[in-house]
C-alpha cells in the first residue's frame, strides 16, 4: 500500500464511531496489555463468566458485553496492523460459535428441566451457513443458521411427567437461542440471526429432522441451495459429554445427506448456468439499490466484488467436488489453492485473486467498523472515502481508488472467463434456419445429416427428456452442427455428434458443458471427425468430456507418479458411512482415472504430438501403474494376510511385456510368488483372482482390461499363480514335461511389471538365463517357421489388400525373426536378451553381423511404418489392419528377403 500511516495515533479509534461510543463507557477496554495473547484466548477468557450464568437476563447482558469488548479488541488490533484478515475472521467466527454453544446449552437445560431430555440422547445441531460456516465471518455480519435434530421422538418427561415431541422441544430451544443472541437490549446484540436458509424458508418449521431435510433435498432442493450448503458447518457440540457418541452419529448422518446433495457424483456443469442466473439476479437487485446511491461502490455484490471471487471458487466446487474430494472445503482461499493444485487456475490467477480477496475483505471490515453497520458500500462522499482510505493505509484517496479499481477490474474479468460472460438472452441459431445453406458447407450428404437430426428429435428418448434437457439439446445442436461442418469429416462427425447427444441427453451436466464451453465443442468435433475409435470411446465414456476443457493438462506429458498419488488419495476417501472402503466406488474411480489418462494420450496422439512408439510406451506405463494400484488394493482387501507386504509379482507378456500396447490391447499376465508360509499358495491365488476382478469387472464406469493368463506354466490347465522355484523348474524342463519352444519364444517379450522387486530381479535373471540356453539353429528355424505358418493359417486374407500385421512380409514376420535371433544367438550375444523392442533388437542383430546390417536397418524402419499404419487403421475403426497403400506394399519384398536370408 502507498504511504503507510501510524495506525494507532492517526486511525484508532477515530476511524470508528462505534468504538468511540463504547470506549467512552469502558475506557479500560482500550488497552494493549493483552496484545501478546492470541485473540481466541482473550475471547475465551472473557466468555468464562457467561458459561456459568443460570439467569437468562444476566446471560444476555454478559454475552453482549463480551461481544462489544471482543469487537473493540479485534478492531483495534486490525487497524493497528497487528493481525491479518484471516485472524480477524477466525476470531469473529469463534465468537459466534461460542455464543451459539452457550445459548444452546442454556436453552436446552431450561427446556429439559420442564420436559426431560430427548430420547436416545438427541441434541440439536446448529448449522452455520455462509461465512460463519466457512470461518469467514465479517465484522458486522449476521449469522445464517439452520436448526436440525436427528430423529423424531419424545422427551423422557420432566418432574411433572410432562413430555414434548422432539419437534416441539427443539423448536422452543431454537426460539430461546435466537432471543439470547439477537434480541436488542441496552447492551446491543450479540449477532443478528437469519433463519431464512432453512428448508422452505420463513414458511417452513424452525427446526427440522434429518429425515425431513433429506426429503426436502430430494423433492425440492434447488441449485442455489447447493451453493448455500457448500460452506455448511455444525458450530456446536453436544450439550452434555454423555451425548457425545449420539451427537457424532447425528453429524455422520447429516454429512451423508448433505454431501451427495451438494457434490454430485458426476461433473456438474449445469451449476455454471444456475450460479450465473443467481448472480444476475443478485446484481440486478444491487443495481436497483445502487441507483439510489450514485457514485458509491458495492464491494461485496458489485461487479468485481467479493461475491464474484466466492462464486468463482464455488463454481469449481459444485462442478468437480464430487469427483475431487480435495475441493470439498469451506474457506474460499483454501478452495482457490486446491484449484491451482488441480490445474483449474494458474498460480498467477490464484495470487491475484487472493490479493483481491484480502483487499476487498479488509475494506469491507473497515466500512463496517465505522458504525458497526452491516454495510458493504463505499460511499461517494470525499470525506468518507478519505476516512476509509486512511484506514486501508493510503494517505492519498486517489491511490486508494486506483488500487480498488485494479482489484475489482481483475476479479470481474476473471469471473467473466470462468462463467463465459454468456448473456441469458443470447440468441442461439435454430436448426429450422436454412438447412441447405448450412449443410452444403462441407457436407457430402446433407439430406442424411438432416434425417439423422430428425431421427434424434423424434425419438422416444428425446421426447421423454425433462423440458430443461430438451431446451439444452435444442440450443446445443445448431452449434454442434456448425462445429461438424468446420471439421475434417463433417458427415461422420455429425453422426457421432448425434450419437453422443443421445447418450448424454439424460445427463444435464454434459449438455451444459457442451453448451457453456465453445472450446469443448470444438475439441469434441475434431476428435469425432478424426477417429471413429476415439468417437466411440468418448461416446462410451462421456465422463471424459471434462478432459477437453483444459489444454494445459490435456496436451502435456502425463506425470504418472503424481497420478498414482492422487488416485491413492481418491481411493482412500471412497468410504461407506461405516468407514469401510466403498469397493464399488473405488472400482469406478480407478476406471474413470485410467480412462482419463488414456484419453489424454489419445488426444495428444490425434494432435500428432506422439509417435506410435511413444503412445505404446505411455499406454504400457499406464497399465503398469494401474496394476500397481490394483495390487495394493486387492492385497489390503484379503482378510487373512500373514504379512504386511505380499511376496508376489506380476509379469507382463506379449504387447504389454514388449511395451507395445495399443488402446484396446488386452493384458497377457502371469503371477509369481516366493513365500514359504503354508498359506501362501491359496492366499496368492485369491490375490490374483481379486486383481482380475478389479481389471475385468464391468461397472458403471466400464472396464479396464481384458486379461489372458494362458502363458502361465501348463496354460489353462496350470495353477493361476506359481512359485518362483516351480516357474524356474518348468522353464528349464522341455519336451512336453516343461516349457514348449513357443513358451520360450513368448519369454523374449516378457518383463517384470509390478510387485515385489526381489522377485522381479529373480525373474529377469531367470529369463535371461533361459533365453541364453544353447539351441541348435536348425531347430530354432524349424520351430519358428512352424509357428509362423500356424499364425498365417489362423488369419487368412482372401482380399487384394495387404494385411500389415498377419500377411507374409508383414509385422509378424519381423517379430518372429527377432524372436528367432534372440533364441538362436543370445547364448553368444547376451545383449540380445534385453527387452528393447523389435526395432532396436533388429538393428543390434545387424551390428553383430547376424543379418545384413543395411537390410536389417531397412526392415526396422519398414516395421515402424507398418506399426504406424496399423495404429492409424485401428483409430479409423477398422477391425483388420489391411491397406492398399502402394508405399507399404513394396515393403513386403525386403521383409521377405530378410526372412529368406535368416530362416530360408
Image: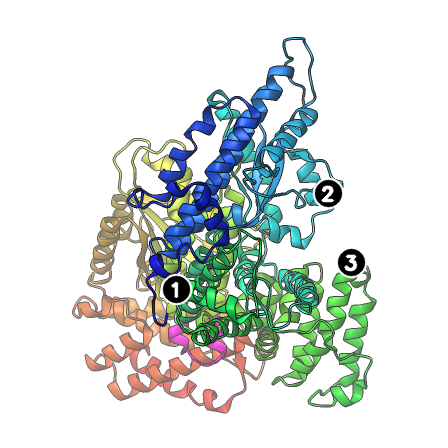
Q: How far is the residue under mark 1 from the one under mark 3? A: 43 Å
- Name the image quarter holding residue 108: top right
Mark 3 highlights which residue? 466
Vertical arrangement, residue 836 with respect to residue 624, above or below: below
* Lower sequence index among marks 2 and 1: 2
Q: Which residue is mark 2?
A: 202
Q: Per the image, is 450 magenta?
A: no
Can residue 665 be seen at all in this image of the molecule? no
Q: Give the image location of residue 767, x and y in percent.
A: 25, 58
Q: Nearer the viewer, mark 3 or mark 2?
A: 2
Residue nearer the viewer, 639 or 362 = 362
- Figure disc tally: 3
- Classed neighbour count for the residue bearing mark 2: other residues with Cα under 10 Å, few (<14), some (14–19), many (≥20): few
Task: Estimate the spatial distance between the alpha carbons at disc 2 and disc 1, rounded to whole Å.
Answer: 59 Å
Q: Is residue 470 above or below residue 180?
A: below
First of labels 3, 2 by sequence position: 2
- Image coordinates of residue 690 in percent, x first then y, are 45, 43
Element under disc 1: helix
Q: Quadrant of the N terminus?
A: bottom left
> Is 304 on the left or on the right of 71, as rendered?
right
In the displayed structure, 364 sits above or below 630; it is: below
Q: Which residue is mark 1?
A: 620
Task: Give whichever of discs 1 and 3 has the lower sequence position.
Answer: 3
In the image, is 293 to the left or to the right of 651? Answer: right
Residues shaded magenta? 602-615
Give residue 96's position: percent from left, percent from top.
50, 40
Q: Secondary structure at mark 2?
A: helix
Amino acid at each position: 500500500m502507498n504511504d503507510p500511516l501510524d495506525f494507532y495515533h492517526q486511525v484508532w479509534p477515530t476511524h470508528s464511531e462505534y468504538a468511540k461510543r463504547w470506549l467512552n463507557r469502558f475506557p479500560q477496554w482500550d488497552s494493549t496489555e493483552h496484545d501478546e495473547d492470541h485473540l481466541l484466548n482473550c475471547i475465551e477468557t472473557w466468555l468464562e463468566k457467561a458459561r456459568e450464568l443460570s439467569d437468562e437476563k444476566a446471560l444476555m447482558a454478559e454475552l453482549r458485553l463480551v461481544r462489544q469488548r471482543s469487537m473493540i479488541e479485534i478492531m483495534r488490533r486490525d487497524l493497528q496492523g497487528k493481525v491479518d484478515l484471516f485472524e480477524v475472521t477466525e476470531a469473529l467466527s469463534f465468537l459466534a460459535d461460542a455464543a451459539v454453544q452457550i445459548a444452546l446449552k442454556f436453552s436446552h437445560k431450561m427446556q429439559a428441566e420442564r420436559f426431560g431430555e430427548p430420547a436416545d440422547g438427541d441434541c440439536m445441531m446448529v448449522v452455520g451457513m455462509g461465512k460463519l460456516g466457512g470461518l469467514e465471518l465479517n465484522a458486522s455480519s449476521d449469522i445464517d443458521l439452520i436448526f436440525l435434530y436427528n430423529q423424531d421422538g419424545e422427551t423422557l418427561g420432566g418432574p411433572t411427567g410432562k413430555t414434548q415431541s422432539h419437534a416441539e422441544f427443539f423448536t422452543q430451544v431454537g426460539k430461546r437461542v435466537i432471543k439470547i443472541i439477537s434480541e436488542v437490549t441496552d447492551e446491543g446484540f450479540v449477532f443478528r440471526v437469519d433463519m431464512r436458509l432453512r428448508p422452505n424458508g420463513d414458511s417452513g418449521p424452525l427446526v427440522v429432522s434429518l429425515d425431513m431435510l433429506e426429503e426436502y433435498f430430494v423433492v425440492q432442493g434447488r441449485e442455489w441451495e447447493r451453493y448455500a450448503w457448500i460452506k455448511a458447518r455444525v458450530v456446536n457440540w453436544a450439550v452434555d459429554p454423555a451425548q457425545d457418541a449420539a451427537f457424532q452419529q447425528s453429524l455422520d448422518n447429516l454429512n451423508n445427506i448433505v454431501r451427495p446433495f451438494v457434490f454430485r457424483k458426476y461433473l456438474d456443469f449445469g451449476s455454471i448456468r444456475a450460479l450465473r442466473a443467481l448472480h444476475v439476479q443478485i446484481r440486478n437487485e444491487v443495481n436497483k439499490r445502487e441507483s439510489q446511491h450514485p457514485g458509491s461502490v458495492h464491494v461485496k455484490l458489485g461487479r468485481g466484488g467479493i461475491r464474484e471471487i466466492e462464486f468463482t471458487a464455488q463454481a469449481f466446487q459444485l462442478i468437480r467436488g464430487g469427483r475431487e474430494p480435495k475441493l470439498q472445503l469451506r474457506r474460499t482461499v483454501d478452495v482457490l489453492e486446491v484449484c491451482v493444485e488441480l490445474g483449474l487456475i494458474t498460480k498467477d490467477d490464484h495470487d491475484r485473486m487472493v490479493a483481491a480477496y484480502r483487499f476487498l475483505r479488509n475494506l469491507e471490515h473497515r466500512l463496517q467498523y465505522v458504525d458497526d453497520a452491516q454495510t458493504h458500500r463505499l460511499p461517494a462522499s470525499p470525506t468518507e472515502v478519505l476516512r476509509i482510505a486512511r484506514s486501508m493505509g493510503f494517505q492519498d484517496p486517489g491511490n486508494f481508488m486506483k488500487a480498488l479499481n485494479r482489484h475489482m477490474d481483475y476479479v470481474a474479468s476473471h469471473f467473466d472467463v470462468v462463467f463465459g460472460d454468456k448473456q441469458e438472452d443470447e440468441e442461439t441459431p435454430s436448426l429450422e434456419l436454412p438447412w441447405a445453406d448450412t449443410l452444403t458447407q462441407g457436407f457430402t450428404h446433407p439430406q442424411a445429416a438432416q434425417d439423422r437430426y430428425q431421427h434424434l428429435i423424434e425419438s422416444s428418448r428425446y421426447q421423454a427428456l425433462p423440458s430443461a434437457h430438451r431446451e439444452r439439446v435444442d440450443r446445443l445442436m445448431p452449434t454442434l452442427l456448425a462445429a461438424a461442418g468446420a471439421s475434417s469429416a463433417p458427415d461422420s462427425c455429425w453422426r457421432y455428434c448425434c450419437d453422443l447427444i443421445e447418450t448424454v441427453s439424460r445427463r444435464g451436466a454434459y449438455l451444459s458443458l457442451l453448451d457453456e464451453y465453445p472450446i469443448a465443442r470444438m475439441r469434441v468435433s475434431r476428435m469425432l471427425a478424426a477417429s471413429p475409435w476415439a468417437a466411440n470411446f468418448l461416446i462410451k465414456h462421456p465422463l471424459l468430456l471434462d478432459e477437453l476443457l483444459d489444454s494445459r493438462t490435456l496436451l502435456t506429458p502425463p506425470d504418472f507418479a503424481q497420478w498414482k498419488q492422487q488416485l491413492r488419495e481418491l481411493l482412500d476417501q471412497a468410504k461407506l458411512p461405516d468407514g469401510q472402503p466403498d469397493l464399488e466406488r473405488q472400482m469406478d474411480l480407478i476406471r474413470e482415472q485410467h480412462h482419463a489418462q488414456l484419453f489424454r494420450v489419445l488426444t495428444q496422439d490425434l494432435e500428432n504430438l506422439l509417435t506410435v512408439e511413444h503412445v505404446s510406451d505411455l499406454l504400457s506405463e499406464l497399465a503398469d501403474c494401474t496394476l500397481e494400484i490394483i495390487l495394493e488394493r486387492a492385497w489390503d482387501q484379503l482378510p487373512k494376510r500373514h504379512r504386511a507386504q505380499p511376496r508376489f509379482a506380476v509379469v507382463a507378456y506379449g504387447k504389454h511385456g514388449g511395451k507395445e500396447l495399443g488402446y484396446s490391447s488386452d493384458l497377457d499376465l502371469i503371477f509369481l510368488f516366493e513365500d514359504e508360509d503354508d498359506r501362501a499358495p491359496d492366499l496368492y491365488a485369491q490375490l490374483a483372482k481379486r486383481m482380475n476382478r478389479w481389471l475385468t469387472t464391468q461397472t458403471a464406469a466400464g472396464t479396464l482390461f481384458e486379461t489372458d493368463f494362458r502363458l502361465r506354466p501348463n496354460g489353462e490347465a496350470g495353477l493361476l499363480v506359481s512359485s518362483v522355484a516351480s516357474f524356474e523348474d518348468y522353464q528349464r524342463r522341455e519336451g512336453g514335461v516343461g516349457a514348449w519352444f513357443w513358451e520360450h519364444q513368448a519369454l523374449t517379450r516378457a518383463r517384470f511389471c509390478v510387485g515385489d522387486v526381489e522377485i522381479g530381479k529373480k525373474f529377469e535373471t531367470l529369463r535371461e538365463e533361459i533365453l541364453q540356453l544353447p539351441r541348435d539353429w536348425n531347430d530354432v528355424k524349424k520351430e519358428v517357421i512352424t509357428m509362423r505358418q500356424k499364425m498365417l493359417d489362423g488369419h487368412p486374407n482372401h482380399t487384394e489388400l495387404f494385411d500389415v500385421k498377419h500377411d507374409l512380409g508383414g509385422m509378424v514376420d519381423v517379430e518372429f525373426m527377432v524372436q528367432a535371433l534372440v533364441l538362436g544367438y543370445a547364448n553368444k550375444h547376451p545383449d540380445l536378451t534385453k527387452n528393447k523392442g523389435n526395432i532396436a533388437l533388429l538393428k543390434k542383430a545387424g551390428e553383430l553381423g547376424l543379418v545384413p546390417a543395411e537390410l536389417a536397418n531397412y526392415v526396422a524402419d519398414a516395421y515402424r511404418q507398418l506399426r504406424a499404419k496399423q495404429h492409424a487403421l485401428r483409430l479409423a475403426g477398422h477391425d483388420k489392419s489391411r491397406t492398399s497403400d502402394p508405399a507399404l506394399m513394396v515393403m513386403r519384398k525386403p521383409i521377405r528377403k530378410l526372412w529368406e536370408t535368416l530362416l530360408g
